[in-house]
Image (cartoon, grey):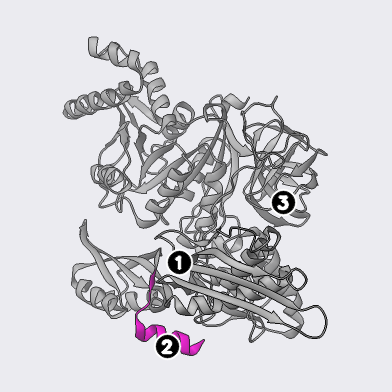
Amino acid sequence: MTRNLRNIGIMAHVDAGKTTLTERILFNTGRIHKVGDVHTGNAEMDWHALEKKHGITISAAATSRAWRDASITIIDTPGHVDFTIQVESSLRVLDSAIAVFSAIAGVEPQSETVWRQADRFGVPRLCFINKMDQTGADFDACVGMIADRLGAVPLVLQLPLGSEGQFHGVIDLVSMTTLVWEAGQTTAREADIPPHRLGEAHALRRRLLEQVVEVNDEALAQYLENENVLSDQHIRHLIRMGCIAGRFQPVLCGSAYRNIGVQPLLDAIVDYCPAPTDRPPIEGNNPRTGAVETRPATPAAPLAALVSKVQMSPYGPLSYVRIYSGRMQRGMRLVNAATAKPERIGRLLRMHANEETEIQEAVAGDVIAVVGLKSTGAGETLSDPDFPIVFGGFHCPDPVIEAVIEPRSSEDHERMGQALARMTREDPSLRVAVDPETGQTLVRGMGELHLMICVETLKEDHNVEASIGAPRVAYREAITTKASVDYTHRKQNGGVGQMARVHLVFEPLSDGETGLRFENRVAGGTIPKAFVPSIQKALQHAMQTGGLAGYPVLGLKATLVDGAFHAKDSSGMAFEVASREAFKIGFEKARPVLLEPMMRVTVTTSGDCLGAVIGDLLGRRGKVLVSDMKGNAHEITANVPLANMFNYVNTVRSLSQGRANFTMQLDHCAPMPEAPQAKVIAAA
């Protein structure tokens, strides 16, 4: 059974057609008999009221369908950068992905982001170039962008038949036939390749064969001896080998809206995407011994599963789980391997968006939902209590924006707190905190849209009316030079006193490093080892509020080089106090700076508005990186401080008479210039 499973995700930039493609897959596999549409709000997978309202995917949704002899689990992921954690958690538990590209826009900013996420998890990919029927569609340009911008190795399996409004089918370079979709027909008619396209098709097929035979020495020798020796079945086998190994990414094309090319894509999923058994055994750590262990994708192995997502439901938390090994059954007693807390499986559900089908058992390779988990969150591992193992989770990005949120009525205050607690469990990239000075509730997220959806979710799902203040930038602090501090804490109050001395050296981290890097170089027992964890704990706590304007410290290296203690008066608390004071002094000596989120902004506009758009970006302290032509439009890419990008959507519409559009995502954090930094510090 595991051999016939395919776990795939559909990922892309917003508006590339992911959800439309998923709808057509559901239609072709018989799940639905009338296709839905994102724009009219009746798409099957965008089931939530807010998704229907805004016409975007907010939360990853799963479904399972059969095609040929395979069972395909599909996860439709959001395309907006504000919800990128949904893509991250989905790719962590999937075996392959379909990267969808618009034939007009090609590789867009979020396309690059999700591609890098898939690279990080080593997920094999197919590419589907969508919207081939629209004006401005350019298949060759899109393939070129996949190679140039993503560093991928595209393997072209199909050519479009007709262009733009005349697009009506594809040329299959493996079988050397065409698939033609007549008007009003849901299935393709097979035909010969038109004579005027034969030369092009033969040349590209030869290039395809030269790529695929490189994955197998025996096939390469056969091909060099006779170019026509490889059968279509053998070619598909080689494509599958290369795709699973990540040697190349097969490229198909079509129009999801018109249902052209969707059935060949389903065939490609079955033929080329890996089954769970094709993936390497997953590695983890035994929490008891610390040893690295593996789990093969077989039902006979001890059970091990990873929770990818938690979603609240009327009957409690609904946990989406990928089973990597073993069998899971209702009533089983498992353990959260990281925390050693016991868990009991209530019900097992096969999901279709927000609909469910109860099942009695799931095996290695299955992606299902579980009811009954009380203390296991997203990114945590469930395992057999006798064979515990902890898998690596996924990276949750730090928020870049925050705002004060308040209930409209005082009676709703407690209900809002409970609702926000449930929402943060569902969405790890949403954070809630309390301002220590004002006592106000702060909600932190990935962008303005993220915070807006948070407020609307409170009303829609929890019946809590709330208002949100003006968004504020989530700045970070950092040091720029090395500083040494030797601090002694003494306190006598008549009884047992407090004494602790720490000598710490603070240094900046290298680019890309974050968090606290703590190193203990104390020799000769000048500080007992029992007190060292208290020093590290104090430094981690101090980094949460920084020392410049109260913002968290992005990262630093702290080296404990010396110290002293008193046999009676020293304690863990004394060393914590000494370390916090040393941090304050050292942080100030190390020339701290504020870091601001720099956003990569990509604006697409017509030529007559180009100057106005660039001028506006420069006026926002932006730095233009690239300005290129894309079809008949200009595409400007710039790095701009997030603080100057609030409500940019209204400005860019005004500058372009509504014709321009833009995307924005976090690029990096950079030191602020002195003047704006002084204003932020004064305000803090």
Kindly check if marks 2 and 1 are in contact, taking CB atoms under 8 A apart as contact: no
Farthest residue in the front direction? 524
Q: Position of residue 588 (x, y in %)?
A: 48, 80
Distance of label 2 from label 1 (alpha carbons): 26 Å
Q: Secondary structure at mark 1?
A: strand
Q: Residue at x 35, y 33 (%)?
A: 248
Give the vertical position of 437 relative to 303 (above or below): below
Name the kind of residue labelled 3 in the image. Thr
Amino acid type of disc 2?
A: Lys
Q: Where's residue 13, x and y in %?
A: 41, 54
Q: Secondary structure at mark 2?
A: helix
Q: Residues within 10 Å of mark 1 (few under 14, many from 20)?
A: many
Q: Between tags 3 and 1, which lies in front?
A: 1
The magenta segment is 670-684
Instruction: Name the amino acid type tagged 1.
Output: Glu
Q: Horizontal placement of 78 versus 243: left or right?
A: right
The secondary element bearing badge 3 is classed as: loop
Residue topped by disc 1: 507
The secondary structure that most of the magenta stretch takes on is: helix
Residue 674: in magenta span: yes
| Residue behind mark 2 | 679
Look at mark 3 in the image and give the residue it sits on: 376
